[in-house]
Image (spheres, helix red, strand yellow):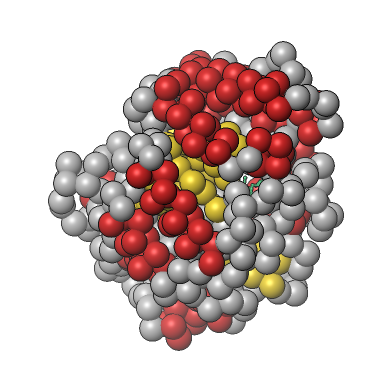
Amino acid sequence: MHSTMRRIATLCLAAGVVCAPSAALASNTYEGDPAPDLISLREAAKAKGIVIGTAVAGGGHHDATPEQNPFRNSPIYQRVLANEFSSVTPENQMKWDHIHPEKDTYSFTLADEIVAFAQANNQVVRGHTLLWHSQNPEWLEKGTFTKDELRQILKDHITTVVGHYKGKIQQWDVANEIFTGEGKLRTDENIWLRELGPEIIADAFRWAHEADPNALLFFNDYSAEGINDKSTAYYELTKKLLNEGVPVHGFSAQAHLGTQWGFDTSMRDNFARFDALGLETAITELDVRIKFDGPRPSDELIAKQADHYGQSLRACLDVPGCKSVTVWGFNDTYSWVPSFFQGEGAATLLWEDYTPKPAYFRLLKEMGVEPTVTPPPTNPQQPPAPQPPATQPPAQNPGSTTPPPSTPKPNAPGDKDKATKPGAGDKKTPQKIAQTGALTGIALLLGGGLAAAGSMAMIARKRY
Ligand code: XIL
């Protein structure tokens, strides 16, 4: 049995997931172990001493869309997840409303499956998230609790959830989105800050550290990629907490970017200043959405998207303590973007049919993986027929209380790995992808856009 098939079988067993070998899995020419001349994102990242991660679909907006949960039902989704990524983040499954739906009830099943998958596939896990203003259960937001009770509720939650995954989570987003764009604490929206004051932040980090002393504890936010009021608020707060001996280990930028904004080139310097404090940095939710009409965005926008992805990763690679870059989903079918940003989409690395976009190759290129093969000529005027998203959800918040990250500002950062610590990783430079006739490779139609962008040669690559 091919190793990937073995891995999938293992994960199915470990996770209790029903995934009988399918014809697609058995017959697909891409069986999971790249040929020696092919390299995955995770392999390229390992050589650079970082991990490259993805959100794992489920919960949140997925509950309001017609697609089946791909993590449980799609062998191809599982294959790509296992083969391309060395870190995973439950997209919603560890949020309060999912994991702690009633006051005295925890629901670990969905998150446990992801952690089991990660262990079966030698991936690290980012835990997301413990203290946030959004996606909290009604029993919490609408409850009538005294301050002492609320404090105990948060302590119990953190102790229970972090304790449940002790030793299995590499990084926790302890506090998520606690500052406004102006750098003020969200004391209105965030129940914890509103009711218990800013001191609760340090407590949350301390409780998480007690529950799992080896987990790295992060602040995480959007529109904090470059140097701006919000990221500076994190910088100042972090300095203060470190002086007080609070176990804060990392600062991460979500990096929900868009091609309508320029790339904020201060991302690198922003990460560098946290690096100088001794913190790890990370990109945790990278996607680059595009406003477009019609079946697909223009080549120009796709090239711009690739550039945003590439510059983000580059910013991370340039900062020693940046060791983890996570994309917020890897296939457009499951992206949160169309559900939250009307008229925008195509934000991920792969088209709906799992064909890689220029952004995918741009990430490889930033990691030193250069294409060496020129694919057969294709007609850049006629891109492959788009896969109509089975059904696009309505453009408003479906079933989730998460407000769209208020218009993300221009730009964002990048980062490096953890399980494979920098320096510990092999230094070999990955050789590039070559297409062979034996593989049902697809000729990427990057010619027009990428050549125009002068950033990449056309290359052919196997299809998943
Ligand atoms: C999003 C999920 O992708 C959606 O499925 C859900 O409906 C809403 O939340 N910042 C965060 C993430 O920290 O948790 C959000 O994820 C995106 C913005």
Q: From what the image shows, is residue 86 above or below residue 328?
A: above
106 sits to left or right of 83 = right
20 sits to left or right of 425 = right
Q: Is residue 41 visible?
A: no
Locate residue 340: give its quadrant. Answer: bottom right
Q: Is residue 203 visible?
A: yes
221 sits to left or right of 152 = left
Tally the numbered discs: 0
Q: From what the image shows, is residue 264 above or below residue 363?
A: below
| Residue 208 locus on image (x, y percent) | 47, 28
| Residue 315 locus on image (x, y percent) | 36, 65
| Residue 115 locus on image (x, y percent) | 49, 26
Write the residue at 52% across / 32% down.
204
Q: From what the image shows, is residue 117 above or below residue 198?
A: above
Residue furthest out toward the bottom? 452
Q: From what the image shows, is residue 28 above or below residue 73?
A: below
